[in-house]
Image (tube, grey):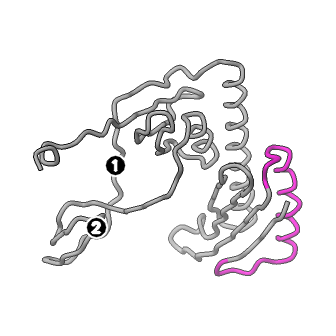
Amino acid sequence: MDVSVTGRHCHVSDDFRSHVLERMSTIEKLSEKVIRVEVQVSAYGNKRQPSESARCEITLRGKGPVVRAEAAAQEKLAAFEQALEKLRSQLRKAADRKKVHRGNHTPKSLRDAALQVPPLETESEPEENQTRTVAGIQVTGDGPLVVREKEHSSAPMTLERALEEMELVGHDFFLFVDAGSGKPSVVYRRKAYDYGVIRIDVTESEAVRSA
């Protein structure tokens, strides 16, 4: 397993690098598919939030989906240990969910559920009469507060694979295209091994049908 340790806006000492290499060797016991580990440590010198002056991000790359965890603390070593603990927790949850599936104990709520939209992150207010494009929408002045736009490439996958990838990246929801139905879908975490799934049935609008 190849381990890469890099620093951003900070120096990575030989002692810290050796500690990371020693600690990351235990990850192989949890995930045998890992080929490369990327550990990036960043320092921001945040005076307002000294407890988050250092941030560590750990990324596992291999034959399966990418696994990532990050944490912030006052010192680099503490940030690394917290990120490592999160990573272990995510790998254990993914492994436990596989055991539940293999034992034919299907999660209780793999069914359609009412869509719950989380609050959107807003950006700073623009200057008056300023025109800009946000997520493909022309916005003048205050306008609608649309937010961040992200685009990811992904192949259609099964529900089980979507659940696995959601656990491995440590998110509470995961957007994917269902391989069976071809529908855009979202799987989300409820309690313990209880999940929900929302599928979107795309229909043509009246304007498209009348064109």
Question: Is the residue under label 1 in contact with that under label 2 (CB below 8 Å)?
Answer: no
Which residue is label 2 attached to? 134
Element type where label 2 sits in the image: strand
Q: Is residue 133 above or below residue 66?
A: below
Q: Is residue 150 above or below residue 206?
A: below
Percent across and percent down for residue 39 are 73, 66
Depth order, front residue of 87/33: 33
Q: Is residue 182 above or below residue 39?
A: above
Depth order, front residue of 141/205: 205
**Residue range highlighted in magenta:** 8-34
Percent across and percent down for residue 175 are 46, 45
Depth order, front residue of 142/51: 142
| Residue 133 lies in quadrant | bottom left
Residue at 44%, 34% (x, y): give it.
181
Three-letter amino acid code of the residue under disc 1: Pro
Percent across and percent down for residue 70 are 63, 58
- Of the numbered discs in the image, which one, if any, rests on residue 119? 1
Residue at 64%, 18% (x, y): give it.
105
Residue at 65%, 55% (x, y): give it.
68
Q: Is residue 21 magenta?
A: yes
